Amino acid sequence: MPLLPGFTLEVVPEIGSTNTELMRRARAGQMDPVLLVAEQQTAGRGRLGRGWASQAGDSLTFSLGLPLAPADWSGLSLAVGVSLAESLHPRVQLKWPNDLWLEDRKLAGILIETASFGEPREAQRYAVIGIGINIAERDASGLSTPPAWLREVLPQVTAGDALLRIAAPLVQAVQSFATFGFSPFQARFNARDVLRDRPVVLSDGISGTAHGVSHDGALLVHTARGMNAVTSSEVSVRPVVP
């Protein structure tokens, strides 16, 4: 990765969680940019503490860790999703705030963790961007959202093929976000927004109609009380099934 001096790529046959490992390294002072790929994860994590199991060859699981200092962190997961979707296939859509969907089923998830290290005035922020993509068909047991897999649209694709498609554009997108924020990604996200103009229900029970995302990545939901800008990544949003 010529745009990331000191960048390294590591591939391990098995690990608990690539995110956990890179956060452990960062706490130990290892804050160089790295892409850590696991052929199999035994303790992968999704948003809200959900598990993400992976078997060798059936999925692509990796984490990108790098020092990052954007003026505003709002919308980073959305910018990452835009890059991934555009690199993978025209039919891949985005579900706010952390998922890639294919035909109303979950294809991939994004989990971003950050930590600050050092004295407050000189503290460095390290970002770990974890990504899990279903490559082959997987069992839907215990999943709240039915899974999709990449071979539905790219029948011969391997995990390695998918990594080659997405790695370089992902790094460039994260660097662009650090410089310019989410605004350049807004229209691109809205073009693939699976929730746009659909009835949705928030985790607090409020219902409304989704109207894309704002310049800072907030989900715009028109409810009986007016237009709401939903910003918390802890809010679960589901499309209403007709």
Image: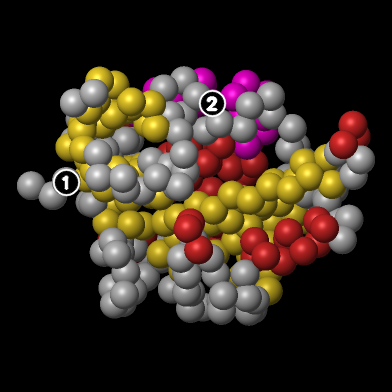
Spot occupied by residue 221 in the image (x, y as percentages of width and height): 28, 29
Asked if residue 155 can be seen in this view, the reply is no
Residue in the image at 58% along x and 56% along y:
130
SS assignment at label 1: loop
Is 144 displayed left or right of 29 in the figure? Answer: left
Spot occupied by residue 66 in the image (x, y as percentages of width and height): 74, 46
Q: Which label was assigned to residue 182?
A: 2
Q: Is residue 225 magenta?
A: no
Q: CA distance from mark 2 to mark 1?
A: 27 Å
What residue sits right under mark 1 in the picture? 240
Residue in the image at 25% along x and 20% along y:
226
Nearest to the observer: residue 80 or residue 219: 219
Q: Which residues are magenta?
A: 174-190
First in sequence: mark 2 or mark 1?
2
SS assignment at label 2: loop
Amino acid type at circle 2 is: Phe
Q: Are marks 2 and 1 in contact (CB under 8 Å)?
A: no
Residue in the image at 43% along x and 29% along y:
218
Spot occupied by residue 92 in the image (x, y as percentages of width and height): 33, 46
Amino acid type at circle 1 is: Val
Looking at the rendering, in which quadrant would you find the N terminus?
top right
Residue in the image at 84% along x and 47% along y:
117
Q: Is residue 179 magenta?
A: yes
Q: Which label was assigned to residue 27?
A: none
Asked if residue 20 can be seen in this view, the reply is yes
Spot occupied by residue 140 in the image (x, y as percentages of width and height): 28, 73
Whether 154 is drawn above or below 204: the answer is below
Number of residues whose C-alpha sits closer than 10 Å to that of mark 2, classed few (under 14), some (14–19) or many (20 or more): many
